[in-house]
Image: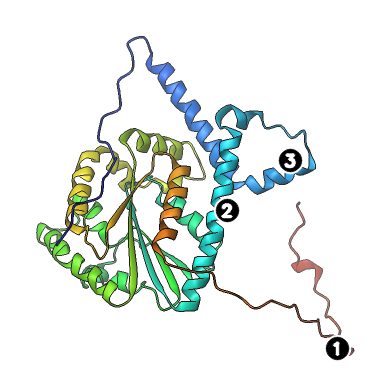
């Protein structure tokens, strides 16, 4: 039997109207300034280590643009905590391998809610053979005729593995329901089956953790604007994503029903407030670590063996024409 669903701070309020004195052009300009700051901030995060290297070699390295839109102390705190939590994730990863634990983490939420960002930070320092990401495309014609859960079962972990589902079998309760990709009978059968399916996974020894990333209407619109203006992220905007903007309320209703009918003691839902992306990442990783009862695994000291030399070995020359051009 389902328990009460978790608290969800997601709001469905419409974008507030501008004051009569503010012109549409001024509002658009203000929004674009925020979009550009967000893009700079994202790129800067990708280059954080390079930035620190530049600063070490050049104490006069200009940082004024960054200071204009982000408090440096807060930013430093974010990276300090992220690296600390990623160190704990490595310990958890070692424990999973050593004990043969099996872990499944489901990430759900609206488009642009931050699922991919936190998955990236969780797996960033981990062995991809152990920590695998499953991001399944739309089902093929053949898969549509299979048992609904069949294509997901193929990605479940073996002993000593963790799998992160970037969207999951809950597609049926969300996008398939809203976009009309499933019948009413298939929709109801999903809700009859999914609690039993997840209980079966747990009984088999798989630990299942489910996260819903919650953002506001306004924040999703802002993030879509960022993607439209970022040539490196435009691929993330599909026609389905754009359609989801028009059907915000339908997705809200589908999400509420999903949480109500699939929040079970064996596999409860956990809601991650995601309007602040950096806080969402830290909070989600911190919570994940609290859910896995891992302990540090002691490793033997690694000693690098001496290189073996053979007096009769001669290295063969490599033809110059197969070297790539040294442009940099």
Determine whether, in the image, residue 291 is placed left or right of residue 188: right
- Dot 3 or dot 2: first in sequence order is 3
Q: Quadrant of the N terminus?
A: bottom left
Q: Secondary structure at mark 1?
A: loop
SS assignment at label 3: helix
Residue 193 figure quarter: bottom left
Q: Which colour scheme appears in the figure? A: rainbow
Q: Which residue is mark 1?
A: 310
How dense is the environment of label 2, judged by Cα within 10 Å: few (below 14), some, or many (20 and up)?
some
Q: In the image as oriented, which residue stretches furthest toward the right?
A: 311
Residues under labels 2 and 1: Cα distance? 43 Å
| Residue 55 numbered tag | 3
Residue 129 appears in the figure: no
Q: Is residue 38 left or right of residue 214?
A: right
Q: Residue at x 25, y 52 (%)?
A: 175
Relative to 248, does residue 94 appear above or below in the rendering?
below
Q: Earlier in the sequence, mark 1 or mark 3?
A: 3
Q: Residue at x 82, y 85 (%)?
A: 308
Q: Which label was assigned to residue 83?
A: 2
SS at badge 2: helix
**Residue placed farthest to the left in the image?**
185
Residue 172 location in percent, x, y?
22, 58
């Amino acid at each position: 039997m389902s328990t009460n669903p978790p608290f969800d701070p997601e709001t469905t309020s419409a974008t507030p109207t501008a004051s009569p004195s503010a012109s549409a052009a001024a509002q658009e300009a203000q929004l674009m300034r925020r979009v550009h700051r967000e893009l700079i901030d994202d790129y800067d995060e990708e280059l954080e280590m390079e930035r620190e290297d530049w600063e070490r070699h050049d104490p006069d390295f200009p940082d004024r643009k960054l200071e204009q839109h982000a408090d440096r102390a807060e930013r430093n705190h974010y990276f300090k905590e992220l690296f600390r939590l990623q160190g704990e994730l490595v310990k958890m990863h070692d424990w999973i391998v050593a004990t043969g634990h099996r872990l499944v983490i489901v990430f759900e939420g609206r488009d642009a809610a931050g699922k991919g960002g936190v998955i990236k930070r969780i797996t960033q320092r981990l062995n991809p053979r152990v920590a695998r990401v499953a991001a399944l495309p739309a089902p093929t014609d053949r898969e549509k005729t299979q048992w609904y859960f069949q294509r997901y079962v193929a990605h479940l972990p073996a002993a000593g593995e963790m799998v992160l589902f970037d969207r999951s079998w809950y597609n049926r309760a969300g996008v398939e329901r809203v976009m009309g990709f499933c019948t009413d009978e298939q929709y109801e059968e999903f809700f009859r089956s999914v609690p039993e399916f997840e209980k079966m996974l747990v009984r088999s020894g798989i630990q299942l953790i489910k996260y819903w990333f919650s953002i506001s209407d306004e924040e999703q619109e802002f993030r879509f604007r960022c993607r439209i203006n970022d040539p490196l992220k435009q691929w993330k905007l599909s026609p389905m994503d754009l359609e989801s903007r028009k059907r915000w309320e339908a997705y809200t209703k589908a999400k509420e029903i999903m949480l109500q009918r699939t929040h079970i003691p064996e596999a409860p839902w956990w809601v991650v407030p995601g309007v602040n992306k950096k806080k969402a990442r830290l909070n989600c990783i911190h919570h994940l670590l609290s859910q896995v009862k891992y302990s540090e695994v002691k490793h033997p000291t690694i000693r690098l063996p001496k290189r073996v030399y053979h007096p009769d070995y001669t290295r063969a020359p490599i033809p110059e024409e197969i070297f790539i051009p040294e442009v940099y």
